Amino acid sequence: MTKRALVTGVTGQDGSYLTEFLLDKGYEVHGIIRRTTSFKNEWLDEIIDNQRYKDKPFFLHYGDMTDAQGLIRVMRKIKPTEVYNLGAQSHVRMSFDIPEYTGDVTGLGNLRLLDAILETGTETRFYQASSSEMFGKVQEIPQRETTPFYPRSPYACAKLFAYWSTVNYREAYHMHASNGILFNHESPRRGEAFVTRKITRALARILSGKQKELSLGNLDAKRDWGFAKDYVEAMWLMLQAPQPDDYVIATGETHSVKEFLTQAFELVGRDWEEYVKIDPNNFRRTEVDILIGDATKAREKLGWKPKCSFKELVYLMVREDLKREGLNPEKYMKGT
Ligand code: NAP
Ligand code: F7E
């Protein structure tokens, strides 16, 4: 039987890596994209232009997490065997500016998708992109599946609604629906407004003379940062498990924003303190001070573990942003 996956959020960091991962595994992949004025999406172009995926079954459909009828139509047309719900307004600081919209897309959007599965009688497995942000003001260190949630932003509140909707549909309708509680994961495809990519992109632009300073906020916040390519494999593993369940996916290490900065700037022999300016606009009303996950359950039940270290992650992000700026990494980076 053809394995047919439906991916929401296909244009994002995880959606694009997951698409490549599934195409390599022989899946037919269908992605939902929003109508936008510009056709361009860098990561989708990377897939479409890649010879490796040239003849692979990859299809795009217009849709939106706020449009229930549209989701039902796509579900009916595709009849996926696996659904990955990655579509979201995913920026935490911005969710304070657009809380209702974030709740609609990130929270209710997931419910609409679950309902579209029910409404169309689709026999499918379901993955919800839950988030470590749900732990917020952490009640336990490290955080595991049993740690109580304490959301600290409209984004985290919306993700909590989606998390419990997924658990409820699993119990009420016996759906194979799982939550991946993923801690921060980054890559050269990370959105430019998230702190890691903001740093590596600015560093490349500083070296090329296009940018003079880098405006940041809270440098003391600590995150458990992994590599996105490792994390999309965990999503897939959850849907191959005989029983649906909820899993923490994390590296088990935590690092501050300051450590990320130091690591990145040292790679090119620069001192970040000469470039970084602190701007209050980059702070959050309520911050998540520290995240560090315990992925023991995923290791024991799914056989999943992260492969890329923090140092390797910073290295590959800096390297890729230098290349995008037209700079030769061998010339600028130590140890290449
Ligand atoms: P991302 O790069 O911000 O991608 C978000 C995706 O959602 C984009 O494809 C975006 O499409 C789409 N989207 C936004 N609003 C939509 C709407 N109204 N209807 C349909 N699609 C919409 O996020 P990511 O880092 O890949 O993360 C993937 C998912 O995992 C998200 O749900 C995120 O909240 C969650 N998550 C991420 C992390 C992490 O560290 N990366 C950790 C835990 C959970 P456009 O291109 O049209 O904007
Ligand atoms: O912030 C601090 C900021 O925006 C990380 C999303 O994928 O992961 C992501 O959410 C930390 C925070 O990621 C700036 O205050 C300092 O403490 O890169 P971020 P996030 O908020 O952790 C979770 C797991 C998700 O689910 C989300 O979808 O860095 N920080 N200065 C800054 N952050 C940003 N963005 N910009 C700054 O200038």
Image (cartoon, rainbow, N blue to C red):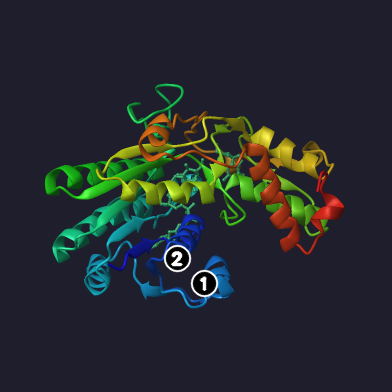
Give the vertical position of 138 relative to 279 (above or below): above
Q: How many residues crowd mark 1 within 10 Å: few (<14), some (14–19), many (20+)?
A: some
Q: Which of the four quarters of the rendered structure image does ligand 1 lie in?
A: bottom left
Horizontal side of 29 relative to 123 (left or right) equals: right
Would you name the residue on which mark 2 appears? 23
Q: Please state which amino acid type lies under the numbered disc 1.
A: Tyr
Looking at the picture, tell me which residue is in the foreground, 113 or 252: 252
Residue 97 percent coordinates (x, y): 45, 49
Residue displayed at 38% across by 40% down? 302
Would you name the residue on which mark 1 appears? 53
Query: Which numbered marker is on residue 92?
Result: none
Residue displayed at 39% across by 22% down? 139
- Residue at the extreme front of the image, as rendered: 1
Q: CA distance from mark 1 to mark 2?
A: 7 Å
Contact between marks 1 and 2 (CB within 8 A): the answer is yes
Looking at the picture, tell me which residue is in the foreground, 295 or 240: 240
